[in-house]
Amino acid sequence: MKKISFIKLAKKSAAKQISELKKINKVFNNSFVRAVESIYQCKGKVICAGVGKSGLIARKVSATLSSVGISSFFLSPSEANHGDLGQIDKKDLLLVFSYSGNTTELTNILKYANRFNIKIIGVASKPDSTLIKASDIKILIPSVKEADPTGMVPTSSTSITLLLGDCLAIALMNKIKFSKEKFKVFHPGGNIGQTLLLVKDIMVSGSKIPKIKITSNITEASSKITKYNLGLAVIMKKNIVEGILTDGDARRSFRYNLKSQNLKKIMNSNPVFISENSSASKALAIMNKKKITSLLVTSEKNINSKNRKKKLKGIVHIHSILKFGIK
């Protein structure tokens, strides 16, 4: 019996889908633009709906929209027929997926939306389908050849529908001027959240910074270090950093009876600074390289200044970095 080459079959299926996906360009027309504008202008929620494989696509599209700050949730048309239609408000917008456009379970949700003048964006491949006829904005997906041996199992059709959903989301991201900073707000956890975490997000600032005047004595400095529990105090002259005094510096001065000595002779007058807009992972790398546990934080403008004396924005401590799981 001839041995089946699964790799050959997989490559053939992939090639078929890649070829069919190129048809997506036919979708990018005035209806697509209207869909982007309508979602952007929506005062309520974007409710994504679909049945079966289209339902899975709708869930994913809804999750993507939510992740970029567009209020959205998935509604199962089957559940909607049994009382969940009450979740739809007149300010909401329906984004409905159905490759055939004639899925029976969609009938009641479409009638409900039409009755209460709730806008519908319909995504289907058949222009004379129930979904397209009921929709205010009609997005026609090109008919595609499925990539399985029978030509019947949803493969290319689900891929092109998902691609359309992602293209909608990306267009909207540009419309709302989505940024890494905004992405971080909606993704505080996981590897992505850790990668985007900035020094200014985790630094100690304001009244939580242990500051002492350059004219203070070692006893006052030691008391400040103990009280704030960061292992150091920042020596200031007006609003400018003169240096830092660490817990170790203070202990040594007491050990060698240097209590009356001027802080300038004990402090580190060349502390390490980092920009508030640097990543937390970069801060950790600097600490590891220099074998220290804290960095002074200043503005982007100050960090690039040739002037050694800098204004203080905060302190980033290794404990804060480790608390967020930065590696």
Image (spheres, rainbow, N blue to C red):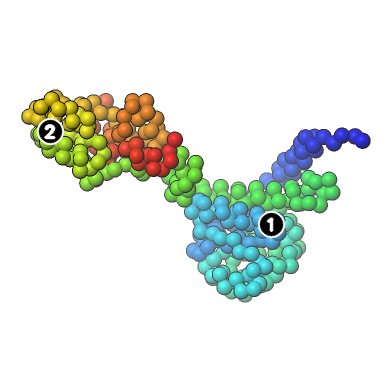
Q: Is residue 256 above or below residue 318?
A: above
Label 1–label 2 contact, CB within 8 A: no
Instruction: Assign a secondary structure to mark 1.
Output: helix
Picture residue at 21% right of the left edge, 27% below the top: 268
Type of amino acid at the residue the image marks with label 1 = Ser
Position of the C terminus, as image quadrant, is: top left
Position of the N terminus, as image quadrant, is: top right
Q: Is residue 70 above or below residue 258?
A: below
Q: Quadrant of residue 291?
A: top left
| First of labels 1, 2 by sequence position | 1
In the rendered image, is residue 4 in sight?
Answer: yes
Q: Nearer the viewer, mark 1 or mark 2?
A: 2
Of residues 216 and 240, the one nearer the viewer is: 216
- Estimate the x, y position of residue 324 in percent, counting from the top left: 41, 43
- Estimate the x, y position of residue 135 in percent, counting from the top left: 66, 64
- Farthest residue, direction front: 255
Type of amino acid at the residue the image marks with label 2 = Ile
Of residues 37 and 11, the one nearer the viewer is: 11
Q: Quadrant of residue 261?
A: top left
Of residues 305 and 83, the one nearer the viewer is: 83
Q: Which mark is residue 54?
A: 1
Residue assigned mark 2: 218
In the rendered image, is residue 242 in sight?
Answer: no
Q: Is residue 130 above or below residue 225?
A: below
- Farthest residue, direction right: 1
Picture residue at 64% right of the left edge, 73% below the top: 82
Instruction: Assign a secondary structure to mark 2.
Output: helix
Picture residue at 23% right of the left edge, 42% below the top: 228
> Local crowd at mark 2 within 10 Å, few (<14), some, or many (≥20)?
many
Picture residue at 66% right of the left edge, 55% below the top: 56
- Estimate the x, y position of residue 44 in percent, counting from the top left: 50, 64
- Estimate the x, y position of residue 68 in percent, counting from the top left: 50, 51
